[in-house]
């Protein structure tokens, strides 16, 4: 599986809130890093992080831009709470070796955009905005 496809699958699984399925995409010794937190290392620890973090459980990731370069993928996203963020993934084979992502890094959407229905359309990534 190409790195971009792995990240697209990560988005689908993230949006379902299934921590077990999401963690399966990581290498056994994979690492996840978020701003101002210690690295989470290992598939089991990553699964536990996703299970315990309520902010993650309430977020629906809607990709705005996905860029693939060799084994690296950059994901720009937004969610129904008008937060924007960025994720960086390093993929080895079809598994994620490293991920960095910020959750709700800014509230930069304009009110005009958010008042339209553009932010609530299903984009093919299992986006179900009714979870909010």
Image (cartoon, grey):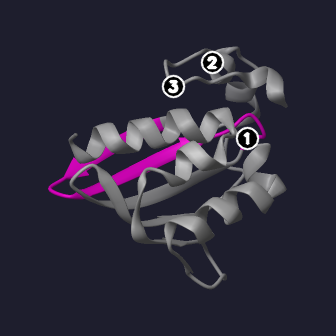
Please name the residue that numbered disc 2 is placed on.
118
Q: Give above or below for 54 relative to 124.
A: below
Q: Give above or below for 115 relative to 81.
A: above
Question: Is residue 75 among what the camera can see?
Answer: yes
Q: Which mark is residue 82?
A: 1
Answer whether residue 108 is magenta in the image: no
- Highlighted magenta segment, given as a residue range: 64-82
Q: Residue at x 85, y 31 (%)?
A: 132
Are the residues at dot 2 and dot 1 in contact (C-beta closer than 8 Å)?
Answer: no
Mark nearer the viewer, 2 or 3: 3
Picture coordinates of residue 15 (x, y %)?
A: 63, 35
Mark 3 packing: few (<14 Cα in 10 Å), some, or many (20+)?
some
How far apart marks 2 and 3 lie (CA) works out to 15 Å
Picture coordinates of residue 98 (x, y %)?
A: 39, 68
Please name the residue that numbered disc 3 is placed on.
125
Q: Give above or below for 34 relative to 9.
A: below
């Amino acid at each position: 599986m190409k790195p971009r496809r792995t990240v697209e699958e990560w988005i689908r699984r993230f949006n379902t809130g299934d921590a077990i399925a999401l963690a399966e995409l990581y290498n056994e010794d994979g690492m996840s890093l978020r701003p101002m937190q210690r690295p989470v290392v290992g598939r089991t620890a990553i699964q536990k992080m996703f299970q315990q973090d309520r902010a993650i459980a309430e977020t629906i990731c809607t990709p705005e831009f996905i860029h693939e370069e060799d084994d690296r993928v950059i994901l720009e996203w937004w969610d129904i709470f008008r937060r924007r963020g960025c994720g960086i993934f390093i993929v080895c084979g079809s598994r994620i070796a490293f991920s960095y992502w910020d959750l709700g890094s800014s509230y930069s959407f304009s009110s005009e955009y958010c008042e339209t229905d553009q932010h609530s359309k299903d984009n093919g990534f299992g986006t179900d905005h009714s979870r909010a």
